[in-house]
Image (cartoon, rainbow, N blue to C red):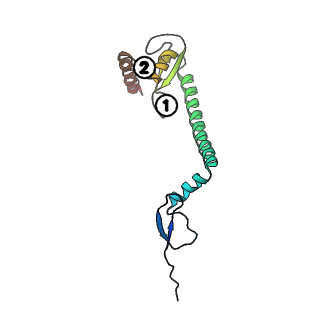
């Protein structure tokens, strides 16, 4: 003869909802609550794990970005000698305008203009100039 299991009413330890189960040991209403309970019980470990994963991802992105920068500098080091926006010849850097970074998709900017691009403090004239340069470069690729 088969034994039928009786449904037991319990209260989830995380979300405090009532649920029915066939198992006496079950403490959580769902897999999500079970996962959240671990985070609640061990917040320091969870934060450390999250930080470790985040650092690993950032490190990978950083290495890829540096590799693209090196390739770009090697390929185009003698091609241009002035900023695409202000035509300055001092403190020139590469600004990649595509993500993921691509060796052929960049502008050469001085440090000042590069900061303007990153902090969104460009005038309309400068923005239009950048857009026109990007269109020109896209046609070449």
Q: Is residue 115 above or below residue 51?
A: above
Q: Earlier in the sequence, mark 2 or mark 1?
A: 1
Q: In the image, is 129 to the left or to the right of 115?
A: left
Residue 57, position in %: x, y?
57, 40
Q: Residue at x 53, y 84 (%)?
A: 3
Q: Is residue 48 above or below residue 26?
A: above
How many numbered tags mark residues here?
Answer: 2
Q: Is residue 90 above or below residue 16?
A: above
- Circles 2 and 1, Cβ within 8 Å, touching? The answer is no
Q: Which residue is mark 1?
A: 102
Residue 77, position in %: x, y?
55, 19
How packed mark 2 is, by other alpha carbons closer than 10 Å (few <14, some 14-19, many 20 or more), is: few
Spatial separation of the CA atoms under disc 2 and disc 1 = 24 Å
The local secondary structure at tag 1 comes to loop
Q: Residue at x 59, y 45 (%)?
A: 50
Residue 130, disc: none
The local secondary structure at tag 2 comes to loop
Q: Nearer the viewer, residue 79 or 35?
A: 35
Can residue 94 be seen here? The reply is yes
| Quarter of the rendering containing residue 64 | top right
Q: Which residue is mark 2?
A: 121
Q: Is residue 134 above or below residue 92?
A: below
Residue 107, position in %: x, y?
46, 21
Q: In the image, is 5 to the left or to the right of 63?
A: left
Q: Residue at x 54, y 60 (%)?
A: 13
């Amino acid at each position: 003869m088969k034994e039928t299991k009786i449904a037991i009413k319990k209260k989830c330890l995380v979300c405090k909802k009532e649920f029915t189960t066939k198992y006496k040991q079950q403490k959580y209403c769902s897999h999500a609550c079970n996962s959240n309970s671990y985070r609640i019980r061990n917040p320091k470990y969870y934060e450390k794990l999250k930080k470790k994963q985040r650092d690993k991802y950032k490190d990978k992105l950083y290495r890829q970005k540096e590799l693209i920068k090196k390739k770009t500098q090697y390929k185009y080091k003698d091609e241009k000698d002035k900023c695409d926006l202000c035509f300055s010849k001092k403190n020139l850097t590469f600004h990649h305008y595509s993500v993921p970074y691509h060796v052929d998709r960049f502008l050469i900017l001085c440090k000042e203009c590069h900061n303007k691009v990153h902090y969104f403090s460009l005038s309309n004239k400068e923005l239009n100039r950048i857009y026109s340069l990007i269109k020109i470069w896209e046609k070449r690729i």
